[in-house]
Amino acid sequence: LQEELQRIRNIVWNFKDGKYAGAQAVHLNAELENCIPLYVKSTCGGKEVQIMWSLDSTEAEIQITQDAFRQIVLNLVKNAVEAQTSDAAIMVASHHFANLDGRLYAQFSISDRGEGIDEKTLRNLFTPLTSDKQGAGRGLGLSVVAEILKSFDGQIKYMENEVGGALFEILIPL
């Protein structure tokens, strides 16, 4: 809990100052395995959520801060959990590297069994205050994720998965 509070404090200060600390070597699979179960438990609201893993057998070292990486994962997990009512599952996959325009990235994805994202929301998906959820404080998570990734030369892409749910693919430089 203390570690998560410090991580959140760091993110707030970095946003306030308009910067992020320099990238570090973060082990992709180890971080996913460490934080996803914690984030599912903290966001599930008593709902039973199955985590399905398909991680590359080779560990990738990505260039990002641990705080930034965890904020990305937290936002994606929170959205995936909230998008589902019953028979909830989150699918997590990683690939050691992807070559995009001659640059090497590690790739991971988080997907769900929800209903996906409607066309209206999809048009402005990574902009602040765009959400198909109800209530206050909605629509900042994905814009924060996109901004964090941009600051580390990473990328995010939305796709619909094979069951019609949301799938977010993230690329972070090796």
Image: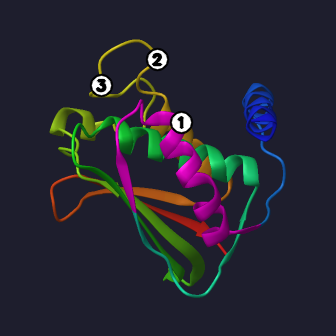
**Which portion, as a residue range, is magenta?**
26-51
At x 25%, y 34%, the residue is 121
Can residue 168 be spotted in the picture?
no
Q: For marks 2 and 1, give the one nearer the viewer.
A: 1
Seen from this angle, which residue lies furthest top? 136
Q: Name the residue type under label 1.
A: Ser
Numbered badge on residue 42 = 1
Task: Please tell me whether residue 66 belongs to the stretch shown in magenta.
Answer: no
At label 3, the amino acid type is Lys
Q: Quadrant of the C terminus?
A: bottom right
Q: Which residue is mark 3?
A: 133
Distance from Cα at disc 1 to Cα at disc 3: 19 Å
Seen in the image, is 16 located left or right of residue 87? right
Of the residues under marks 1 and 3, which one precedes in the sequence? Answer: 1
How far apart are the two marked residues, 2 and 3, measured between alpha carbons? Answer: 10 Å
- Whether residue 50 is visible to the viewer of this picture, yes or no, is yes
Specify the quadrant of the image occupied by residue 13.
top right
Discs 1/3, front: 1
* Residue 83 place in picture, x, y as percent: 29, 38
Q: Residue at x 22, y 48 (%)?
A: 87
Question: In screen coordinates, is 20 left or right of 138?
Answer: right
Camera-nearest residue between 118 and 59: 59
Q: Looking at the image, is mark 2 or mark 1 earlier in the sequence?
A: 1
Residue 145: where, in percent of width, then height? 54, 44
Which quarter of the figure has residue 129?
top left
Label 2: element kind: loop
